[in-house]
Image (cartoon, helix red, strand yellow):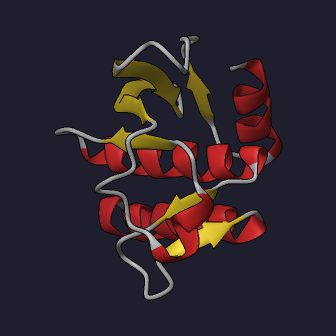
Amino acid sequence: MECWNTALKAHGFDLVLDPFDLRTDDCYRPALWEGEESGFEWYLSDDLTDAPRGILASADVEASLCFTSQAAEEVVSCVAAAVLAQVTGGYYWDAETEAQTHQGDAAIAAARKILQKWRALDG
């Protein structure tokens, strides 16, 4: 958890996740996004029956970060997921892009694009 928050800060995102057990805590996870309360739904599963396959065929676990009603939660969940993928060597799945899966720095770049788009709409 500490590593995830450290990586978020290192990438310049103003997002701080409340501590939780990534393996056992399936539920809404609070966070601070740019000083405001936010968060996302967190689910971890090793049942990949319905997961997008292709490049993800070697995956053995899937973390789902979902947003609910607040517009900022979409950005929060995308940023958190992209940084988690980068830190763990996993894949960030982005339904809005043609490539759809990103790894490493490409995951961070995809999250920055979502953030930029959100700022343009919010501003």
Horizontally, residue 106 falls left or right of residue 92, namely right
Asked whether residue 51 appears in the rendered view, the answer is: yes
Residue 118 in percent (x, y) is at: 39, 62
Residue drawn 50% across and 24% down?
32
Q: Is residue 23 above or below residue 117?
A: above
Q: Position of residue 44 (x, y in %)?
A: 44, 32
Q: Position of residue 83 (x, y in %)?
A: 66, 48
The N terminus lies in quadrant: top right
Of 18 and 24, nearer the camera is: 24
* Residue ranking furthest to the bottom: 98
Q: Nearer the viewer, residue 86 or 12?
A: 86
Name the spot of residue 26 as percent of width and height, x first.
36, 19
**Residue drawn 36% across the image and 76% down it:** 96
Q: Is residue 15 left or right of residue 64?
A: right
Q: To which quarter of the image does residue 90 belong?
A: bottom right
Decide if residue 80 is on the left or right side of residue 72. Answer: right
Image point 76% across, 36% down: which residue? 9
Residue at screen point 65% across, 51% down:
85
Q: Is residue 66 above or below residue 114?
A: above
Is residue 110 in view? no
